Amino acid sequence: MTNDQIKTKANEVLKKYVQRGGVYKKFNSIMSAEKIKFRSITAKDNFLGIFTHANNGQAYIMINNNISNDGRRNFTIAHELGHYFLCHQLKNGQCFDADIFEDDTAVDTTEREANYFASCLLMPENKIRSAFLSMLSRSHKAKIKDFLHVKNNYTWGIWCGFRNDLMNRYGVSETALRCRLSNLGLAKFSFR
Ligand SMILES: [Zn+2]
């Protein structure tokens, strides 16, 4: 699938299930509407999540309850939802630490597609673009109002002024946020 097709699919899901606020607050209602059962399970550290079907056809998303970072946990659930909504035919459905990258570098095609889906679902382009640009325009420190290049202590300070607000709003880690903003051409990170 192309990135555009994946983005379109993510936007359809958002349109159907999310009227306002971050999608991560709606994970439970999305899964119950889609008749997916959710389980938080104890597993080895490098196991993050799985999308699978039981013999009776029941779909399950299971997430390792050891994931301590909320952003990482949300990204993992969104990734597993990606396997579901993109109708991936998975061999066993298990997704490990080495599959779920928040920065678009996964090698395996279905894993990369699920990661891109997760990014589009958690941080819809139109919303994050306008949120980021309005923060930049309100920043007294930022001289450039449509692009942020974090390249020294000064620009790092500007970034620190609103990264937490964006991370909380979208329920994502800093890694996922940086990746999304870079991919959308809104920011570049060459410092820290
Ligand atoms: Zn996966």
Image (spheres, helix red, strand yellow):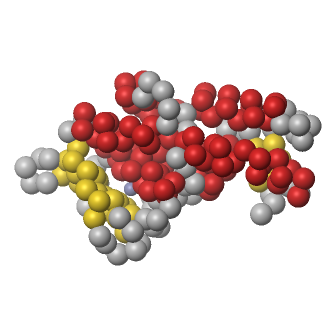
Q: Is residue 186 left or right of residue 156?
A: left
Q: Is residue 166 left or right of residue 161?
A: left
Image quarter of the N terminus = top left
Residue 146, image x and y in percent? 81, 32
Question: Which residue lies at the image location 49% right of the left edge and 37% below the top edge?
Answer: 22
Image quarter of residue 165: top right
The one nearer the camera, 60 or 167, is: 167
Residue 188, image x and y in percent? 77, 48
Quadrant for ligand 1?
Answer: bottom left
Image quarter of the C terminus = bottom right
The image shows a total of numbered marks equal to: 0
User: Considering only vertical position in the picture, is 126 above or below 28?
Assistant: above
Residue 95, image x and y in percent? 37, 61
Please indicate, yes or no, whether residue 132 appears anywhere in the rendered image.
yes
Image quarter of residue 173: bottom right
User: Considering only vertical position in the picture, is 46 above or below 165?
Assistant: below
Question: Which residue lies at the image location 60% right of the left edge and 47% below the top edge?
Answer: 167
Q: Residue furthest left?
A: 56
Q: Is residue 167 left or right of residue 8?
A: right
Question: Which residue lies at the image location 44% right of the left edge and 34% below the top edge?
Answer: 10
